[in-house]
């Protein structure tokens, strides 16, 4: 019968069965095909054939299950899956550039998973050969490495937290801490101090001989239909003594250790209560030399809430003149005082009739006399009646033997009223002055 071409074990792994397929009498070829089909079926049932495409098709033929795949085309880089017996569809696996993504088309590493990865047994093996089956500290994660701003090991027994006191130290031109709250009405920062302690302390950066020191706090109100307030301060309530101040400000030290500028306001200032001061004046550019000088005038003060009104008037041929005052004059003032001065000629002038219906009359002994007049009154409006300024006041027990300006009475700084009211703050300022 001659030599028969065969498919050997080199082409079909397994036992070296010889299959005459392409030559010889038909009976041998039929016998060989039947033998091959029986062998392939056995190998398929034993899961011997893996991903060999040709043999997989032969397996399908041997088992009588061959069907044509009808799906055409596909999506680039997606690994397909059988969505039916004859159709393919995209699976959740995506491969590009040697990176595989599950649930994502943008894998950033060898394997990127968009979702939870579950290990039902075995755990996870790391490059050092260790296997982690749990994140619990007794059988897995034992600690998390972190900087000094955090505390704790990151385990159930020692959870991560903010290290207290928290210290953030940067050496770049950036903020140590930035807080943003995008919620409507949300606060960016809320701080509460302990008993008899300050909620927050801010210190500006130091300057040099040629540069200014840094600001401790820069505050800006938010923009909107109406601008927000940069500072809103309310003093604490006092249960035994007086309530606390809304704002306390002290000037920095001058080279001669004096304190001058405690506050600067670059606009109008409204005070709804009383204003107490040691002195006061206006300060403007000097009218005659505005580029090089200032001009000051002191306030005119009185122990009373006194208003001053003045003007000039000329009497008529009968030596009479009527002075009209604003319609609110008598509603605002009481206890009137008058001064008259004649101008331009020797004459006598008197107040012929006092203020009534917001007017008074002047009489001169000569006609056509120019008269300068001045009228003062004491405020009698509702606020003034409720808040009379005391002319004299006894110092409280805490402030006795202390002075507003102890240096004027040859007393040490510790004898100031500020030391009596706020000793802790004054001690801190004294320490700062020594630095």
Image (cartoon, helix red, strand yellow):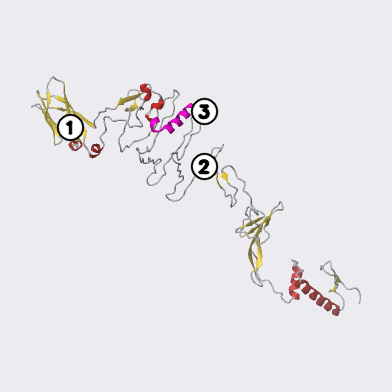
Image x and y of residue 273, in percent: 30, 37
The numbered mark, 1 or 2, whose residue comes first in the sequence reads: 2
Which contiguous range is marked in magenta?
419-435
Q: Is residue 424 on the magenta stretch?
A: yes
C-alpha separation, residue under disc 3 versus residue under disc 2: 25 Å
Disc number placed over residue 205 in the picture, else none: none
Mark 2 lies on a secondary structure that is loop
Q: Give the prevailing secondary structure in the magenta stretch.
A: helix
Image x and y of residue 84, in percent: 64, 71
C-alpha separation, residue under disc 1 versus residue under disc 2: 61 Å
Mark 1 lies on a secondary structure that is strand
The numbered mark, 1 or 3, whose residue comes first in the sequence reads: 3
Q: Is residue 402 above or below residue 31?
A: above
Disc number placed over residue 335 in the picture, else none: 1
Nearer the observer, disc 1 or disc 2? 1
The numbered mark, 3 or 2, whose residue comes first in the sequence reads: 2
Image x and y of residue 111, in percent: 66, 56
Q: Is residue 347 left or right of residue 125?
A: left
Judging depth in this view, the residue of 282 and 271 nearest the camera is 271
Judging depth in this view, the residue of 110 and 427 nearest the camera is 427
Seen from this angle, which residue lies furthest top? 346
Q: Look at mark 3 in the image and give the residue it sits on.
A: 208
Q: Is residue 342 on the magenta stretch?
A: no
Q: Which image quadrant for residue 352?
A: top left
C-alpha separation, residue under disc 1 versus residue under disc 3: 59 Å
Disc number placed over residue 177 in the picture, else none: 2
Q: Is residue 267 visible?
A: yes
Disc 2 residue crowd, few under 14, some 14–19, many 20+, Cα 10 Å: few
Residue pictured at 44% horizontal, 33% vertical: 424
Q: Is residue 292 visible?
A: no
Tell me the quarter of the image containing the N terminus.
Answer: bottom right
Residue pictured at 64% horizontal, 69% vertical: 83
């Amino acid at each position: 019968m001659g030599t028969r071409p065969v498919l050997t074990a080199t082409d079909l792994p397994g036992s070296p069965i010889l299959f005459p397929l392409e030559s010889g009498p038909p009976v041998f070829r039929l016998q060989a095909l039947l033998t091959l089909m029986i062998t392939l079926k056995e190998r398929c049932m034993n899961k011997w054939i893996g991903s060999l495409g040709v043999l997989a098709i032969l397996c399908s033929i041997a088992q009588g299950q061959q069907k044509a795949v009808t799906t055409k085309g596909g999506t680039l880089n997606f690994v397909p899956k059988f969505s039916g017996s004859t159709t393919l569809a995209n699976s959740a696996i995506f491969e590009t550039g040697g990176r595989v993504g599950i649930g994502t088309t943008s894998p950033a590493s060898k394997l990127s998973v968009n979702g939870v990865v579950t290990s039902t047994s075995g755990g996870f093996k790391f490059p050092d050969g260790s296997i982690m089956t749990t994140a619990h500290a007794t059988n897995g994660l034992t600690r998390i490495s972190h900087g000094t701003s955090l505390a704790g090991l990151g385990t159930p027994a020692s959870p991560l937290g903010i290290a207290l006191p928290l210290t953030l130290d940067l050496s770049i031109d950036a903020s140590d801490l930035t807080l943003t709250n995008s919620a409507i009405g949300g606060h960016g920062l809320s701080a509460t101090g302990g008993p008899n302690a300050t909620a927050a302390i801010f210190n500006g950066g130091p300057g040099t001989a040629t540069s200014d020191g840094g600001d401790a706090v820069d505050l800006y109100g938010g923009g909107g239909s109406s601008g927000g307030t940069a500072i809103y301060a309310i003093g604490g309530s006092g249960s035994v003594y007086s309530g606390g101040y809304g704002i306390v400000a002290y000037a920095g030290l001058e080279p001669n250790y004096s304190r001058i500028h405690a506050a600067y306001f670059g606009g109008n200032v409204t005070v709804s209560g009383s204003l107490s001061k040691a002195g006061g004046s206006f300060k403007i550019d000097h009218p005659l030399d505005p580029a090089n000088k200032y001009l000051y005038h002191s306030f005119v003060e009185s122990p009373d809430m006194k208003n001053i009104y003045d003007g000039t008037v000329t009497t008529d041929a009968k030596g009479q003149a009527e002075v009209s005052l604003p319609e609110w004059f008598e509603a605002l003032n009481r206890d009137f005082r008058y001064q008259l001065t004649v101008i331009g000629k020797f004459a006598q002038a008197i107040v012929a009739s006092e203020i009534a219906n917001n007017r008074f009359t002047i009489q001169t002994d000569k006609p056509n006399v120019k008269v300068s007049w001045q009228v003062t009154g004491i405020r009698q409006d509702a606020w003034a009646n409720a808040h009379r300024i005391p002319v004299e006041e006894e110092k409280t027990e805490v402030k006795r033997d202390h002075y507003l300006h102890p240096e004027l009475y040859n007393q040490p700084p510790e004898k100031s009223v500020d030391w009596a009211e706020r000793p802790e703050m004054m001690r801190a300022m004294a320490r700062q002055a020594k630095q």
